[in-house]
Image (cartoon, coloured by chain):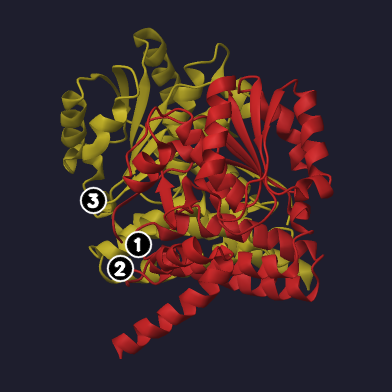
Chain colours: A red, B yellow
Amino acid sequence: MDNFVFHNPTKILFGDGMLDRLPEELEAYGPKVLLVYGGGSIKRTGLYDRVLTLLGQADREVHELAGVMPNPRTEKVYEGIEICKKESIDLILAVGGGSVLDCAKAIAAGACYEGDFWQDLYIEGRVIDRALPLATVLTMPATGSEMNCGSVISEWECNMKQGYKNDNLFPRFSILEPSLTMTMPRDQVVYGAIDMISHVFEQYFSPPDDNNLSDELCEAVLRNIRTNLVDALEDLENYQARSNLMWDATVALNYLLGMGKLGDWQSHQIEHALSAWYDIPHGAGLAIVHPNLLYYIRKEAE
Amino acid sequence: MDNFVFHNPTKILFGDGMLDRLPEELEAYGPKVLLVYGGGSIKRTGLYDRVLTLLGQADREVHELAGVMPNPRTEKVYEGIEICKKESIDLILAVGGGSVLDCAKAIAAGACYEGDFWQDLYIEGRVIDRALPLATVLTMPATGSEMNCGSVISEWECNMKQGYKNDNLFPRFSILEPSLTMTMPRDQVVYGAIDMISHVFEQYFSPPDDNNLSDELCEAVLRNIRTNLVDALEDLENYQARSNLMWDATVALNYLLGMGKLGDWQSHQIEHALSAWYDIPHGAGLAIVHPNLLYYIRKEAE
């Protein structure tokens, strides 16, 4: 097993009703919150009202950044950074799926950074030593962004999609209520599961190849995803399946599965290039890329 | 899956040579270190000299508490607490196996507490809101104490062995060098593996019984322990087997495997009562208790 460092300080609150603990969790942070969300589905489902009520109970001053799109873009990040700097925001609260979370992480990084976040961090990979505190309420299990320190942002002018990782970008806490995922349409459930499977493959199909715990854990997560994806597609309101898939997504990319392994990430790199041109859902891109890459590699190996 | 909160902030540095990072990791803490260790095997193996050299490089003022025994006792904890209070210790560094780590945790708790640590915390279960920072260098994979917030202490006057858990007792960082475990005799390797297996069983054989990720992860860890215990017993210097067993022990009780499950811990409770009278090694006690408990439960269920 290769040497490794594992340090994941994110606190996970998992289960129905856990969102009600939000005021208590906010106590450790200052009064000004930037609420980041997407295209408005959280308003249709009532989640927006529920979060605002809880923020009100906690006596927080709430600023908002709405309209984060899938494959989140630099424009929205700049907009968020400006609000954080102007309003001296104390905590960013991202409510949504992986795109909203990744956008919020970029804002958290950029809000404490003097230069251009995109050029310096995402393109040149400069290391930052601080970021705004970030918390998340997840509505879509897929990327694992709720318990990792990675973020992927797209720039449409030059058709680039780039990732950035920094220890300061681990969410301080993440609230995972499985029932919030019940409104996800069938396609999104499948895309999410493909993203999880792909995350596990990137760790599993990488050196070293010898007997190690990480591979055993990868197989365990894959088995659980398979069982629960089948169950969820048979009945989209199966709580057991939805809750398992939600926790699968988190464990699939909270870095534990890759300890002592090199990691591959070729499929993800190719998918990033693809969706930077065609703006396709990340899971759909991986569904095209990953099997074909594996097929290509197997042919090469023969 | 039951609701749960998962928060494990311990930083793990795993692999050979990782101990050399000790000075760097110490930078975040004050200058006064209490070095806690056991019966002196770390002196025979040269580990003691290596740690002292690194503490010297970091310009630390070192105080020592030696002679922590298996099934660590209240007397040694009181001795450590007194040093911490008198010398205004900034960080406790535990070098050894689970007993040394558990003793160091009790000292970390007691050093910031005004009342009697044993009566108030271990017997009455009072909640503490702070403890001295604690770091560990592990020499024996078994208890998982290096990445959890639990500690078990024995009191010989009244033949009691009691556990205590508190979030402030997660080690800040733990250094795991597999080669440090190579000098462990065959019996200790077996006892350690039995402790790991028992930890997994306590989580696996507990409600809810339905399809969940925790059970899959438990099976993955059990498979890895089995494979590597066999390999280690065939060749005690098999690095691959030793390193896997070391990481197995940590994952077996860093709480991840029990998320969404109730947990049993009957075998551990019975073993604590047993070894509080007979002072047998914990793993040996579990080897007697756990199979018999499972046999008894199976008969009851039939």
Q: Are marks 1 and 2 in contact (CB under 8 Å)?
A: yes
Q: Residue at x 51, y 70 (%)?
A: A286
Which residue was labeled with disc 1?
A261
The x, y position of residue A127, in whole percent, is: 33, 38
Q: Are marks 1 and 2 on the same chain?
A: yes
Q: Residue at x 75, y 28 (%)?
A: A55
Asked whether residue B289 is in view, the answer is no
**Mark 1 vs mark 2, CA separation in Å:** 6 Å
Residue type pointed to by label 3 = Asp
Crowd rating for badge 2 (residues with CA inside 10 Å; few <14, some 14–19, many 20+): some
Residue B62 marker: none
For mark 3, name the chain: B
Q: Secondary structure at mark 1?
A: loop
Task: Tell me: A154 left or right of B294.
Answer: left
Q: Secondary structure at mark 2?
A: loop
The x, y position of residue B21, in whole percent, is: 24, 37
Residue A208 marker: 2
Asked whether residue A40 is in view, the answer is yes
Looking at the image, is B196 positioned above or below residue A285? above
Which residue was labeled with disc 3?
B16
The x, y position of residue B184, in whole percent, is: 28, 53
Residue type pointed to by label 2 = Pro
For mark 1, name the chain: A
